[in-house]
Amino acid sequence: MAGNGNARRDSTGDLRLENLSKIFPEREGQGEVRAVNDVSLTISAGEFVTLLGPSGCGKTTTLRLIAGFELPTSGRILLDGKDISMQPPNKRDMSLVFQSYALFPHMTVFDNIAYGLRTAGMPRAQVQAKVNEALAQMDLEGLGERRPNELSGGQQQRVALARSLVMEPRVLLFDEPLSNLDAKLRVQMRSEIRRLQRRLNITSVYVTHDQIEAMAMSDRIVVMNAGRIEQIGTPQEVYRYPQSRFVADFIGRANFIETRVEAVDGEQVTATVLGRTVHVPMEPLPKVNDPLVAVLRPESLYITDDTAGYPAVIEQTMYLGAETEYIVQAEGQALTVIESGLSALRLFDEGQTVGLSFEDEAIHFLPQTESVAV
Amino acid sequence: MTAISPRRYVDQFRRIFQDPILAISLIVVTVFLLLAVVLPILAMIGESTSPEGRPLFAHYLGTSTYQTIISNTVVMGLVVATVGTALGFLFAYVQVKVKAPFKRFMHIVALIPIISPPFAVATATIVLFGRNGLISKGIFGVRYNIYGLHGLTLVLALSYFTVVYLNLKGMMQALDPALEEAATNLGASKWRIFRTVTVPMLIPGLLSSFLLLFVESIADLGNPLVMGGNYEVLSTRIYISVIGLYDTTAAAVFSVILLVPSLTVFIVQRYWIGRMSVVSVTGKPTGTPQLITNRWVRWPLFGLTMFITLLIILIYATIFIGAFTRVVGVNNDFTLDHFDFVINGYGSAAMTDTTTLAAVATPLAGLLGMLLAFLVVRKEFLGRSALDFAGMLGIAVPGTILGIGFLLVFNNPIQLTLPFGGAEPLTITLIPKLTGGRAILGGALAIVIVYIVRSVPAALRAGVAALTQIDPAIEEASISLGADNARTFRKITLPLIRPAFLSGLIYAFARSMTSLSAIVFLTTPQTKIMTHQILNEVENGRFGNAFAYCVILILIVLVAISILYLTVGSTTGAERTLEGGA
C-alpha cells in the first residue's frame, strides 16, 4: 500500500505499536482510567493512517504516546524496528501538528518555521533556504516577517504544517489539525495535506473525530472506541464491511434490522431481511438460528410506489437538494432512506404507503452479540 | 493510593531524569528550598521544643504580661487588616466604579508605599503627628501621643494597603459588566447591586486581602519598634529576645507562637479561599461598566479617597523635605549633611552593600521563581505541591522567624565527618558558616539567600498565573521540533512569561531593598544593610539621616525599576496586533 507516490525519500518510517496501554489515575478518587487498552497496530512507511473515534476513545492519547508526550503503562512502540517507547519526545524523529496550531506567538512566521532547524544546529544559509522553500510550498511567501496573530486561521494552519514538514521527520503526527477551520477551508486543506503527504511520502498518523475527513484522506482507518481498536481497514472496508455495530454507526449512517440465521451454506448465510430471503457471505460463520443484525446503509434502500417492495409508511420527508432523506416506518422501526440522483427528483409525501427494496449485495450481516446501546 | 501509583511516580521521575538539565534544575531548586526555607523553620521549631524551650511555652501562655503581648498581636492584626482592606477597597472602587476626577493621580500615589521601607511612613508620621508634631503641636497645639495601636494602625494600613488595592482593582475590572447590567435589567437599584452582586462576587478577594494584611502586620517589625511605644507585640518581643537578651530559645518559643496564626492563615488562604473564587480573571469584559454618577455617593467617596491620597503625599513630602532639613520643626535650615552622611560618610557602605546584595539576589530570585513556576505548572512528579508550598513559605513565615532559623542552622559550619579508620577523621565542610562573626563573605551570602527566599513567592505566583494562561501545546510544539526542556524554557517559556518575569524581578529588588525583619539578625559589621541603618538612626532620634536614607533607597529602587523595564522589557512580542491589514 505504501510507496504508491513517487517516493522522494527512503522508505523509512515503519511504525509499530505493540500491546500499547495507558492507564491514568482518575482525577478525584482512587480509580483508574484505561485511556488506551492493548492497542496493536502496524503502520508501514509512507502510509497515511487515521485514528478515528468519538471523544474520549483514546485516539489522542495514542497519538501522544507515539509522540512521546505520554509514557505507556505497558507495551512498546517501535520505529523502524527500534524500541522508542521510553525515548523523550524531542529525540524521536517525529513532528506533531497541533489542533491549536501552537505557533510561537512571540516569533515571526519565519522564526517559527526555522525553530526546529536551528535547534538541530543547521547552518544559517541552509536554514534560510529551507524555510524559504517551505514558505513557497505552503503559499506563504511574503508573510515570513508577520507574527502569528497577524495571520488568518488558514494561514496559521499552513505555518504549523510548514514548521513540521520542514523537519522532514520520519513520522508526521496530526492532532485534529483542521477542527478550528471553517467548513470550506477544511475541505481544501485536507486535500492539500494529503497531496503533500503523498509527494513527500512521510508516514502519517492523523487523529480526527470527523469520519468524512478520515474517509477522504486515509490509506487505512483505525476506528477506536473506549480505548480499544474496533476495526482497522481501508475506507471502503470499514464502510462496506463494518465489524461491529459501533463501527457501522460511527462511520456513515446505518439502519440495523434484526433477523436470524436460517441456513448456512459454504461461506454464505441465509436470512430474511425486510421480507426477502438473502444469501450473504459472512465470517466467522454463525450457526443456524443465531440472531443476526443486517446493516443497511440509507443510500442502499430504494423507495418505490408499487407493492413489490416491503410495505412501509413515509413518516418524514426532508428535501436536501442533492438528495432527499426519508424516515419511514417498516417492521415496527424507523428506517432512514436517502434517495439521490434521478430518484431524488420524485418526492414521496409524508403518510404515503410505499414499497422498500434493496440490492442483496448492499446487505452486511453482523452477529447479534453486543448490547444495542452505542 | 491506587495500586498503580508507585509505578506512576517512578515513570514520572524517569521521564524527568531523561533530561539531565531538567533533573539538575529540579534537584537544585529542591535542595535550595530545603536548606534555605524548610531547614531553618524546622530548626527554629526544634529549638523551641528543646528541654529549655518546652517549659517556656507554659510560662508565656500562662503569664498575663505575655498574654497581653499575644492578644496585642492578634488585635493589631485584625484592626490593621480591617482598616487596610477597607482602604484598598475604597481606592479600587473609586478607581473602577465611580466617575471621579484625578483617578490617575490617586492611582500613582497609592503605589508609592510599595517601594519605600515600611517604617519610613512611621517616622514621617511621628514628625507630623507625634508629641512635637508639625501638625498635632504646630497647628492644633496638642502634645499628641501617636505611639500605640492607633498610630500603628495608621502606618501599617497605609504601608500595606497597596497590595489590597491592586488585587481588588484587578478583580473589579474582571467582573463581567453583564452581571450588573442583568441586575439593573431585573429592576435592582445601584445600592442593591452593590450589596447583592458586586460585594458577594468580591468576597474571596476581600477575604484573602484581609488575611494577607493580617499576616503582613503581625510579621512587621520596623513599625512596632518605631511606633509601638508601650504596645508590645510578638515580633518586637522576638527582636528584643535576640538583640537585647541573646536568648534564642525564648525567641524560638515566641516565634512558634507567632508562626501558628501566620501559617494557619496561609493554609486557609491557599486551600480554602483559593477554591471559592467566583471571578474569572481571564476573558475580556463584554461591555463598559456603568460608572456611579450619583453626587451623594460620588463626592463623599472621592473626598475620602482624595483625603487619604493627600495624606500619603504629605507623609512622603515630609520624608523628602526632612532629608534636606537640619531638624524638622526645630531647626528648619536647609542642609545636605544627611545626604553627605549617607553617600560619603558612615552610611555609604550600607548603601552600596544593600544595593549590591539586592542586585545579586534579584535575577536569582526571578529565575528561581520562573523555574519553580515552570516545574509546578508544567511537570508532574511526586512532591510537586510540596515544592510549591515550600516556595511560598518564604513569605508565609514572618521574616524574624526566618532570621532566627538562619542563626540556628548556619551559625556554625555544617560538616560531615567521615570515620576513615585512621587517627585523623576526614572532615568535609558541606556548608560554611553563613551568619554571625567570621561568617563567609561577612554574612553577605546569608543575606542574599534570605532576599531570594523572601522574593521567590511573588515571582512564583506571577509565573504560575502567566503560565496557566499559555497553551501547553506551545511548549510541546517546541519539544516536538527537537528542542529539549532547557531550550524550550529559554526560547519559548521565558519570553512568553516575560511580563511576569519582569514583575517578579521588580518585586524582588524592591522587597530586598526594603526588607528589615528577615535580615535584622543577619547583618554583621562587615555587611551593613540600609533598612537596619535607618532603624538605628530612628531609634537614636536622628530622623534627618533616616529620611536621607529613605530618599536614596526610593531613588535606587526607581532607577532599578527603570533599568529592568529597559533591559527585560515588559512585553512578550506576541501582543503586536494586526496592523496594515492582512
Image (cartoon, helix red, strand yellow):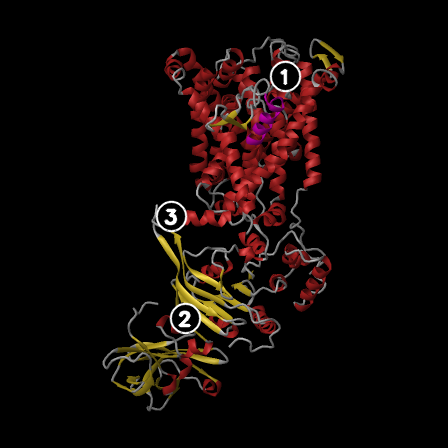
Marks 1 and 3 in Cβ contact (< 8 Å): no
Residue A359 painted magenta: no
- Magenta stretch: dominant secondary structure: helix
Kind of residue at disc 1: Pro
Which residue occupies the foreground of this view, B303 or B561?
Answer: B561
Identity, as a three-letter code, of the amino acid under mark 3: Ser
Image quadrant of residue B59? top left
Q: Chain of mark 3?
A: B
Measured in 3D between alpha carbons, the distance from the residue under mark 3 to the one under mark 2, in whole angstroms, is: 35 Å
Camera-side mark, 3 or 2 = 3
Q: Residues within 10 Å of mark 3 (few under 14, many from 20)?
A: some
Specify the label residue B11 is tagged with.
none
Q: For the residue marked with disc 2, what is the amino acid?
A: Phe
Residue B123 screen position, x and y as percent: 62, 17
Residue under pointer 2: A250
Marks 3 & 2, CB-CB < 8 Å contact:
no
Q: CA distance from mark 1 to mark 3?
A: 53 Å
Of residues B242 and B307, the one nearer the viewer is B242
Q: Is residue B291 visible?
A: yes
Q: Which residue is mark 3?
A: B5
Of residue B139 and residue B241, the one placed in the foreground of this image is B241
Image quadrant holding the N terminus of chain B, namely top left
Where are the magenta residues, as a range?
A: B439-453
In the picture, measured across the screen, residue B321 lies left or right of residue B227, that is right
Residue drawn at x 40%, y 20% as measured from the top left: B49
Q: Which residue is mark 1?
A: B525
